[in-house]
Amino acid sequence: MKFLIVTCIKEYQELVFKIFSQAGIRAYSTTDIVGFKDQQNSNMLEDWFASGDEQFDSCMLFSFTTEINANKAMELVLQYNQNNHTNFPLRAFIVAVEKSSF
């Protein structure tokens, strides 16, 4: 069993739903999160009009799934990121589950 975690900006949530479906992941959970990006710049002139730290409405989707499904989802995430150069790539993580109660 694997614990698959995908984070994305809120606008990409439907995309991750489709990736999970294509990977055979039918049961998952989602939670809203707020992401922060601190891009402090040492050159004050380049940051002249900056308004402070950037904040993004994001979400985290996660599932306890098989290794095959988790690996398929990871492949799809990597393909998406490779084919769609964006400032907000999908982030995916596969974590091994050592023990569970079921």
Image: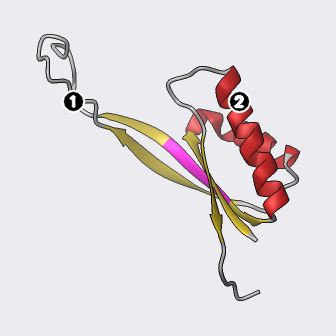
Task: Give the residue drawn at x 47%, y 40%.
Answer: 57
Res. 40 mark: 1
Query: How many numbered callouts?
Result: 2
Q: Residues within 10 Å of mark 2 (few under 14, many from 20)?
A: some
In terms of secondary structure, what is the magenta stretch mainly? strand
Image quadrant containing the C terminus: bottom right
Query: Of all residues shown, which one is farthest toward the left?
Result: 44
Is residue 17 shown left or right of residue 90?
A: right
Task: Give the residue drawn at x 65%, y 79%.
Answer: 98
Res. 56 mark: none
x then y, percent, for residue 99: 67, 84
Question: What residue is shown with label 2?
Answer: 80
Q: Which residues are magenta?
A: 58-62
Q: Is residue 50 above or below residue 98?
A: above
Residue 60 part of the magenta-drawn span: yes
Looking at the rendered structure, the secondary structure element under dot 1 is loop
Task: Give the residue drawn at x 80%, y 41%.
Answer: 18
Amino acid, disc 2: Tyr
Image quadrant containing the N terminus: bottom right
